Image: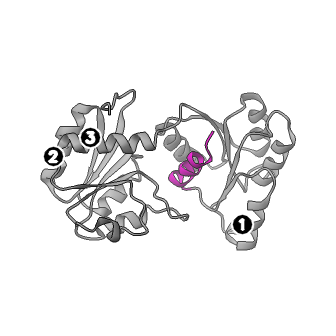
Amino acid sequence: MKLMEQAEQKRVLVVDDDKLILKVMTDFLTPKGFDVTLAECGEDGLKRLETVTPDIILLDINMPGIGGIGFLKRIMLSHGGLQYPVLVFTTRTTTKDYFRGIPVDGFIAKPCEKSELLIKIQEILEKHQRPAIKRILVGEDDLMVASRLSRVFRAAGFEIEEASTGPEVLEKAAVCLPDIILVKQILTGMNGDSVASVLQAMPRTQSIPVILYDASRVARKKEEESRLRRRKGIKKYLPTDDPTTLLNAVKGVGF
């Protein structure tokens, strides 16, 4: 297997309470072209994720506080997957039983050979290879939410077009023909589900996948969520505006 040729700098989050391990990982991975972020416990790791979107997380399990398992449970999505690829550092011999129900991408013993670590990282990154730059149209009328979404999606390699009203989403979709449309349900001018229906009826846009999202309490009612999921033209519906959850949903749709 070829070692990674860094066409772009990959982001690694290392979560470990051993300061020597953190230093060794930084000294080893940085010259290899990685952007390394460090966290000394699970809680610190979660805080880092508020501002960093890693391509892979290197995670110790035996840490104080919530520990590695607590950290994993907090980055688990509703369908059971994880928000990020995770390689676990472990000294346990029964890792499969210990991690039953938690879909980490791999395990590596502590201590390990650096060459083995690099190969493991390479394998996981290739498994979760980002798509070539794809264009996403985001319909969001809250400037702060729009800014967060834009930052996370651009960091993940996507090209972003923005619209702040329902009619503007329709107009921009017909002009720029994005690969996917991410639209808020309660949107100025026209709600997201209505936007999806119109897009479905337009020959130029009917094949573009639409992901509908809504963090408002209205859409959290089960009957409302069920209706939105069944609405024609909607590929996915998510009752959240969390950027990392929406990013994973977009990646899950495929192109």
Residue 243 sits inside the magenta stretch = yes
Mark 2 Cα shell of 10 Å, populated few (<14), some (14-19), many (≥20): few
Please identify, in this view, whether the residue under mark 3 or under mark 2 is nearer the observer: 3
Quadrant (top left/top right/bottom left/bottom right) for the C terminus: top right
* Amino acid at circle 3: Leu
On the image, the x and y values in percent for residue 204 come to 81, 33
Q: Is residue 194 left or right of residue 53?
A: right
Mark 1 Cα shell of 10 Å, populated few (<14), some (14-19), many (≥20): some
* Amino acid at circle 1: Glu
* Amino acid at circle 2: Lys
Picture quadrant of residue 180: top right
* N-terminal label among 1 and 3: 3
> Which residue does the image show at 74% across and 33% down from the upper left?
172
Mark 2 to mark 1 CA distance (whole Å): 47 Å
> Which residue does the image show at 72% across and 31% down from the upper left?
177
Give residue 118's mark: 3
Magenta highlight: main SS: helix
Mark 3 Cα shell of 10 Å, populated few (<14), some (14-19), many (≥20): some
On the image, the x and y values in percent for residue 215 come to 62, 61
> Which residue does the image show at 39% across and 47% down from the upper left?
52
Judging from the image, what secondary structure is the residue with disc 1 in? Answer: helix
Please identify, in this view, whether the residue under mark 1 or under mark 3 is nearer the observer: 3
Q: Is residue 14 left or right of residue 188?
A: left
Q: Which residue is mark 2?
A: 23
Q: Looking at this view, is 216 or 234 the one in front?
A: 234
* Magenta region, residue range: 242-255
Q: Which residue is mark 1?
A: 225
Picture quadrant of residue 107: bottom left
Mark 3 to mark 2 CA distance (whole Å): 16 Å
Residue 170 sits inside the magenta stretch = no
